[in-house]
Image (cartoon, coloured by chain):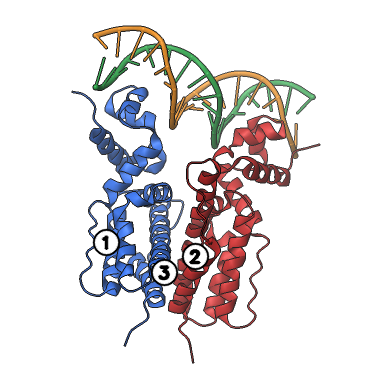
Chain colours: A red, B blue, C green, D orange
DNA sequence: ACCTGAACACCGTTCAAGT
DNA sequence: ACCTGAACACCGTTCAAGT
């Protein structure tokens, strides 16, 4: 049966989870799919485009809903994004790369801006969303890299609660962006 | 004259500024220095170590001083770090990589934690500093990547003020971390 | 001590030619 | 339409052997 774009993304996700981001190469992917490397380029423009598609897939489970107040909606969205990233090995690196090149494609990340737009001027909503995104991706990338290094024994597996540390940053940012209207 | 570690770092910085991060390879570096690739490995353990040394050099001009209140000291430090990064093409990518692997080596980044420790509990200071660092590196990396793409014509050169956007994020974070004690 | 030469095991991408 | 075969121009790293 003919190779398909979806099949390629599936295989990429599999390599990512089994061997990590460093091992995700076009040639490795071709090997896994039992085709020649060149075959991939019929379905995908280049590696960059593949990574962007991969990022979309990784974030697909996240649904930002604007229920309740912006504050708790953003808080929930941040946690959902983190969860989606942690579900796939190396995901934060993939999404960080994609985010810089094609931010408009990553809907959940745009969603943050929409949520903030409910309480801020358009410009502040945009800036605030980017601040959040940089923090989220940076924090989770660090978490995942540390997990990677700890698994290989290059780093002591930190016994601290990453989830708590993550939320501390989100809450600090939210406190600064959306001061209590009381 | 014999090759030296400092010489290698100098050449790396030169390649970075002239051709960008993507072109900074061990082989390219060797070519520039007119030695065989293997020669580099007498002076440097591997590429990772070279990048870490490069990151230290890039951030060397930054001096965090704890004068005045923590708030304005951190604000100034963030701006200084951004300036140091913007002075070298691709610097944010280099420092981001180094930061994940050996955060203790990047003194200016540790300095942020020290500054915050003046007003927060040790744990909150650590978390707060990491939040700031993730934001700073993410924001500047995006700025530099966009400049890179715009220079190549792949992206319209955004006419907005990146400095203002950067400060908005820093101030939001600081407002959340260090609420006005008034 | 410091470097060369040569190798090993890889990359991303292109493209004529086949089916 | 979809893929192979083969090439091009690269990587990071190691290591015997030379000086």
From the image, which quarter does the N terminus of chain A lie in?
top right
Local secondary structure at mark 2: helix
Q: Check disc 1: other Cα within 10 Å, few if <14, some if 14-19, many if 20+.
A: some
Residue lying at 45% horizontally and 55% vertically, measured from the top left: B155
Residue lying at 46% horizontally and 78% vertically, measured from the top left: A175
Q: Chain of mark 1?
A: B
Instruction: Give the vertical position of A154 relative to A162 (above or below).
Output: above
Do badges 2 and 1 share one subunit?
Answer: no
Residue annotated with mark 2 = A165
The answer to the question of whether label 3 and label 1 lie on touching residues, with beta carbons closer than 8 A, is no
Residue annotated with mark 1 = B80
Mark found first going from the N terminus, 3 or 1: 1
Q: Position of residue A153 (x, y in %)?
A: 51, 41
User: Any mark on residue B124, and which?
Assistant: 3
Residue lying at 67% horizontally and 29% vertically, measured from the top left: A36
Local secondary structure at mark 1: helix
């Amino acid at each position: 049966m003919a190779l398909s774009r979806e099949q390629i993304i599936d295989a990429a996700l599999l390599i990512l989870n089994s061997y990590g981001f460093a091992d995700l190469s076009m040639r490795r992917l071709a090997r896994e799919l039992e085709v020649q490397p060149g075959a991939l380029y019929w379905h995908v423009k280049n590696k960059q485009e593949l990574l962007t598609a991969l990022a979309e897939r990784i974030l697909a489970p996240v649904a930002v809903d604007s229920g309740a107040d912006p504050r708790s909606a953003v808080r929930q969205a941040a946690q959902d994004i983190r969860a989606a990233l942690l579900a796939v090995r190396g995901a934060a690196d993939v999404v960080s790369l994609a985010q810089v090149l094609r931010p408009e494609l990553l809907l959940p990340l745009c969603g943050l801006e929409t949520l903030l737009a409910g309480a801020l001027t358009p410009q502040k909503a945009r800036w605030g969303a980017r601040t959040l995104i940089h923090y989220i991706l940076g924090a989770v990338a660090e978490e995942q890299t540390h997990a990677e290094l700890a698994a290989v024994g290059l780093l002591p597996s930190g016994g601290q609660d990453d989830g708590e540390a993550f939320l501390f940053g989100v809450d600090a940012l939210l406190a600064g962006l959306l001061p209590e209207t009381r």
